[in-house]
Image (spheres, rainbow, N blue to C red):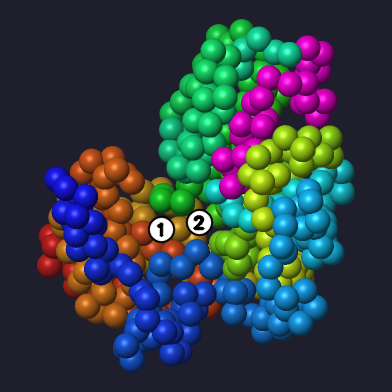
Amino acid sequence: MSINQMIKTFQAAMDNYIINVPMADGTTSSPEVDINGKKYINFISNSYMGLGNHPEVKEAIKQAVDIYGMGSGASRLVGGTLLPHLELENEIASLKDPTGKKKAIIFSTGFLANSGAIPAIMSPLNIPSFHVAIEKIWKNGEIYSDHLNHRCIIDGISLAVRQCPEKIKVIRYEHNNAAHLEKLLSKSQAERKLIITDGVFSLNGHIAPLDKLVEIAQHYNATIYVDDAHATGVLGDNGGGTGDHYHLSEKIDIQMGTFSKAIGGEGGFIVADEHLIEYLRCQCSTYIFQTAMPPCIASGLIASLKIIKNHFGKKLRMTLKENADYLRQQLKSIGYNTLGSNTQIIPIFIGDKEKAALFASSLKDACILSFAYYYPAVPKNESIIRVNLMAQHTKDHIHHFLNIMEDLGKKFRLI
């Protein structure tokens, strides 16, 4: 197949998904969007709390533009650090670790956080923040990665291996299977061991068993690294994410996350021991050589984090959980398989790739935006429709969706 044929094939596949027209009555941070004057219920957004549209957040961005303009003008290390960056690091560190013992470093995107931090952490250098003291350059290291970890984790691991392939071994453990992880670790002779997992998995909505993983990590002198992109702001009494959910935030060595999901903006972060954070500032290439996050975005994120921490944020989390619990229950009663999801991300099993594509197209015809995912995003013949819920979805939105799902389930012989 030629390059032109590949481009045409890709464009044809994306026709039902691309939204590149003005949103006249809402944005992708809203539960409804307007496309060419037609209103759609939005189940594709990662903005689980709808904070990208919050008036306090937008006002903070406007004020910051008046003060700082649009861009930072340089990387953090050579003049690009501005007051909003420092305040944002303090805000996210206090959310992820209320004890105040840990610090944060921010990145322009979450992808840059993983693709830069993982290689830096696995660099064969002495890092004093690792709880097992390493007095010399280590001889061998192992990365234990959940089988369903996100692509940016996989890319970060690949970069780590590329920098010293003779030293690093990658071992994948069965998804959320703590017993399998422990069995693998029990055989390890590596000097440095890093366990990496998503906190909430983006395609199936599963929560990692962090209580068990942390216990295993401590027993085998391993460091645990959690990508909390889809949990930060959503899970836990305070919205601190998966660690907050299990009440063990202080025991997670490295918490990574994004500002582009529940927090409603853009960017990524690492929260960890102060020494490791300072090490990343001078060792992590995606921090050193990347222009700093625009200060107006950092200011909006600060406002968003303050909302997440207050009473209104708690109310949003409760509403989001109620929406998710209700929709899962109703989908199951209709006859759908939601694949064990227990968060705001709800996969609906379809199976066949072509059927999933037609199903998503039929949903769009019914003014519902929800994507189909199929191989290689998921295993062959395990295609799904993924529903991303927001706190702003109403019961009317959910009931309309359920009615359409019941009709389509019968049409496609899925229920």
Residue 397 drawn in magenta: no
Q: Quadrant of the N terminus?
A: top left
Residue 117 percent location from the top left of the image: 65, 38
Q: Quadrant of residue 16?
A: bottom left
Q: Provide the secondary structure element on which disc 2 rests.
A: loop
Residue 116 magenta-drawn? yes
Badge 2: how crowded within 10 Å, few (<14), some, or many (20+)? many
Q: Measured from the top left, where is residue 207 in percent x and y?
A: 53, 46
Q: Residue at x 50, y 43 (%)?
A: 152
Q: Which residue is mark 1?
A: 346
- Residue at the disc numbered 2: 343
Q: Are marks 2 and 1 in contact (CB under 8 Å)?
A: yes
Q: Position of residue 40 (x, y in %)?
A: 35, 81
Which residue is most to the right? 100
Viewer can see residue 298: no
Left or right of 178 in this view: 291: right
Q: Amino acid at mark 2?
A: Thr
| Magenta extent | 112-136
Q: Residue at x 54, y 68 (%)?
A: 47
Residue name at image x 13 percent, y 60 percent: 413
Residue 365's image quarter?
bottom left
Q: Nearer the viewer, residue 48 or 161?
A: 161
Question: For numbered disc 1, what is the local secondary structure?
Answer: strand
Q: Position of residue 24 (x, y in %)?
A: 43, 90
Task: Rate crowding at label 1 as few (under 14), some (14 to 19) or many (20 or more) other CA atoms within 10 Å.
Answer: many
Left or right: residue 326 versus residue 378 is right
Q: CA distance from mark 2 to mark 1?
A: 7 Å
Q: Nearer the viewer, residue 337 or 93?
A: 93
